[in-house]
Amino acid sequence: MSAITLKQVVKTFGEHRAVDDLSFEVPTGVIFGLLGRNGAGKTTTIRMMLDIIRPDTGKVEVLGRETADGTKDRIGYLPEERGLYPKMKVREMLAFQGAIKGLPHAEGLRRADRWLERLELGVWRDKKVEELSKGMAQKVQFIAAVLAEPELLILDEPFSGMDPVNQDVFKDLILEMNRAGSTVVFSTHVMESAERLCHEIALIDKGRAVLHGSITSIKERFGKNALRLEFEGSGAFLAELPVVEHFNDYGQHVELQLVQGADEQEVLRAAVGRLRIRRFEIVAPSLHNIFVQQVGGEGSDA
């Protein structure tokens, strides 16, 4: 059984079509990335998965059901707009969140204590939420999402606004939850996070699925004519070569996507004599480059 299935889903708000004939499946047991630029329709899609809003047409099935009846206690959710109760004490607030998912109060307190100690927040357990720093509050919000050990964990932009240390903490927690059996779905427009963590992705743009599948298969599809060059000198002229379809300059190196059927040796011949080449290799394109190639342009909020 798939953890989530969307079939030809449409959702509009007035004249704006936020989700447009969207279809994809999330297999049980994977880490799945819902990817797209800001305004692509990711959050709207997540809200339909959670039965917060309903599609105008199409089908959304989560954990085998089309409505939230019988599934809410099996789902953990971390919203993009973090929402905690500022006047409550941290430990009691977490136990309250657990009770909403069916945990007995004493068990909620026990799990809260365990998580708070683990994330180095034990001394803050009896402080009010409003006394926490932003980083601490993000950790507490995550604890609230996972306290009931959900079968399905949905994270909306989980790395938003995080420093690198907390990003690594959350990355490890996501992997741990998945290895313990949870299906994890997270939305992001940060391709590096998705590339490191996800087994499968759906890339959406203007509410439609542009790409859907495993990271491996998608990279194989786009990776037969990608090059990486490291060199000394100015490589701007490489962008003008007839065999180059996409040119990405990273300062210390460039990544090139060649036109279909092009010979990579043409690039090497053009570079020799004009650049001091340190590295020349055929590579799988980064998810970032695939994203830019498939989407590009500017989006609007949705």
Image (cartoon, helix red, strand yellow):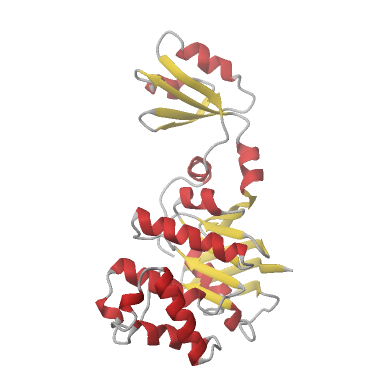
Q: Residue furthest bottom?
A: 105
Q: How many marks are shown on the rendered structure?
A: 0
The percent position of residue 215, horizontal first and vertical second, equals 61, 47
Q: Is residue 40 visible?
A: no
Q: Residue furthest left?
A: 131
Horizontal arrangement in the rendering, residue 276 relative to residue 6 (left or right): left
The percent position of residue 45, horizontal first and vertical second, equals 54, 68
The percent position of residue 50, horizontal first and vertical second, equals 55, 76
The quadrant where residue 85 appears: bottom left
Q: Nearer the viewer, residue 118 or 230?
A: 118
Which residue is pictured at 62% across the width and 28% down the height? 260
Q: Nearer the viewer, residue 144 or 289?
A: 144
Q: Quadrant of the C terminus?
A: bottom left
The quadrant where residue 115 appears: bottom left
The percent position of residue 291, horizontal first and vertical second, equals 51, 46
Which residue is pictured at 53% across the width and 69% down the height? 154
Q: Nearer the viewer, residue 96 or 252?
A: 96
Vertical position of residue 94 compared to residue 118: above or below: below
Q: Is residue 151 visible?
A: yes
Vertical position of residue 99 compared to residue 22: above or below: below
Q: Residue furthest right?
A: 1
Q: Residue furthest top?
A: 273
Which residue is pictured at 55% across the width and 63% down the height? 176
Which residue is pictured at 40% across the width and 74% down the height? 116
Q: Nearer the viewer, residue 226 or 124?
A: 124
The quadrant where residue 8 appears: bottom right
Vertical position of residue 15 compared to residue 237: above or below: below
